[in-house]
Amino acid sequence: MTANLLDYDLEGLALFCERLGEKRYRAVQLFRWIHQKGAVCFDDMTDLAKSLREKLATTAHLSGLPVISQHLSKDGTIKWLFDVGGGDAVETVFIPEDDRGTLCISSQAGCAVGCRFCSTGHQGFSRNLSTAEILGQLWFAEHFLRKHLHQSERVISNVVMMGMGEPLQNYAALLPALRVMLDDHGYGLSRRRVTVSTSGVVPMLDRLALDCPVALAVSLHAPTDSLRDDLVPLNRKYPLAELLDACNRYLAHAPRDFITFEYCMLDGVNDQIAHAQELVRLVRERAGVGFTCKFNLIPFNPFPASGLIRSSMAQVQLFARILSDAGIVTTIRKTRGDDIDAACGQLAGDVRDRTGVEERITRQRRIAIHHITDVVSADRSQ
Ligand code: SAH
Ligand code: SF4
C-alpha cells in the first residue's frame, strides 16, 4: 500500500520525503501543491523534478473521499455526503456568509458519546476518521468551491469541528489535520478561525491547549450535573466542575480570551428560567478566577427518534435575556441549511445498520437526487 499524502502535516511530509532521499524544501513544495493548489496528481506538479514525481508515483497517492451526494440549500449552504467505506458516510457543510465562509467538518463516523438530542449520537459509533479523511473534506470543499465560484483566492476562512463525531475522542488524527489547517504552506487559517467543539473530554482539552490551542467551543447544554448526566452521558465521567476547571486552564493558551459554550434549547428540558439562573450562578462562581465565556444558544433541530421538542423562540429569547442581563454575552444561532437537513445535530451518516451496504448507499444517492430535485424546483418557482 502506498501512502496517502493527505495523511501528513508538513513535518510528516518532510519525514516522508527524507525517506525518499529528498530535501525538506521539496516537502514544502509538495505540500503547497496539495493544499494550496489542490493538485490531484503528481504530474501536475510541474516544478518538481521528474525523478521525484516518478518516485512519488510508486510510493504515494492523493486520495480524497468519494462524494455520494451534494445538496444545495436555498440560503447557499451546501452539504456533502462522503463515502468513507464499509457502509459509513460522513457529512460536511459549507456555510457562506457576507464576511466569511465556514466549513463544518466531521471527525468520526457516528459518535460514542450518545447525546440525547443529537442524531449522530443516536446512531452509535462506527469508527474514527483518519487525518486524510478529516482533511479530505477541507481539501475537496476548498478546491471545489474555488473552481465553481471562479475564485483563485481562499474561499473557506473558518473551520468548525462541529460535524459528526467527538473530535477530542479522535485526537491522534485530529492534531495533524489542525496543523495543516493552520500551516502557512497549507490553508493558512488563523487559530481564532479554527474551532474545536467538544462535549468535554477533559484530559484531551489539556493536550490540545499545549499542542495546538485553537478556538474552543464546549457543548454545555445543562447547568447541573444531574441534567447534564442525562443529556450528555460523558458528563458522568467528566462532571461540570472538572470541565469548567479544564476550560479555565485552556483559557491561558486560547487564541481568544473567552470560551464559547453551546447550549441546545430543548422545550421544557433545559430552557426554563431556573436553568438560566443556575447557569449564571455557575459562571459567576468562576468569575473570581478570571473565567470569561460567551453563550451560543442553539434552537434544537428536531429529528424523529429524539422525542424532544425545540424551545419556542420566545423562550429562547427570554433565556438569552437572563444571561445577557447578568453580563454574559449571549447569541442565538441562526439555523442554516435546514431545508437540506444540514443544521447542527441533523447530520446522519446512517451507520448503525451495518448490513446491506450497497443498498444503503444507493438509497442515500436516491434521497440525494430527490433533495437536489426539490431544491432545483423550489428555485425555479421563485
Ligand atoms: N461532538 C462535538 C462536536 C459535534 S456536535 C460536540 O458535541 O460539541 C456540534 C454541536 O451541535 C454541538 O454543540 C452539539 O451539542 C450540537 N447539536 C447536536 N445535536 C443538535 C441538535 N439536534 N440540535 C441543535 N444542536 C445540536
Ligand atoms: Fe457526539 Fe457531539 Fe452528537 Fe454529543 S452532540 S453525540 S458529542 S456529535
Image (cartoon, grey):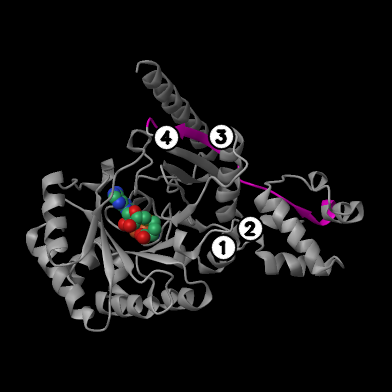
Label 1, residues with CA under 10 Å away: few <14, some 14-19, many ≥20 = many
Task: Provide the residue designation for mark 2.
Answer: 186
Ligand 1: does it lie within 8 Å of the C-beta at label 1? Answer: no
Report whether 224 appears left or right of 206. left
Image spot of residue 124 (x, y percent): 39, 55
Ligand 1: does it lie within 8 Å of the C-beta at label 3? Answer: no
Q: Is residue 364 above or below residue 192?
A: above
Extent of the magenta region: 57-74
User: Which of the two residues, 11 or 98, is positioned nearer the viewer here?
Assistant: 98
Going by the numbered disc 2, the residue's amino acid type is Gly
Q: Is residue 268 above or below residue 24?
A: above
Q: CA distance from mark 2 to mark 3?
A: 20 Å
Going by the numbered disc 3, the residue's amino acid type is Leu
Are discs 2 and 1 less than 8 Å apart at CB?
yes
Regarding ligand 1, which quadrant of the image does it lie in? Answer: bottom left
Could you tell me which secondary element the residue under label 3 belongs to?
A: loop
Image spot of residue 216 (x, y percent): 39, 66
> Residue at point 58% right, 54% down?
135
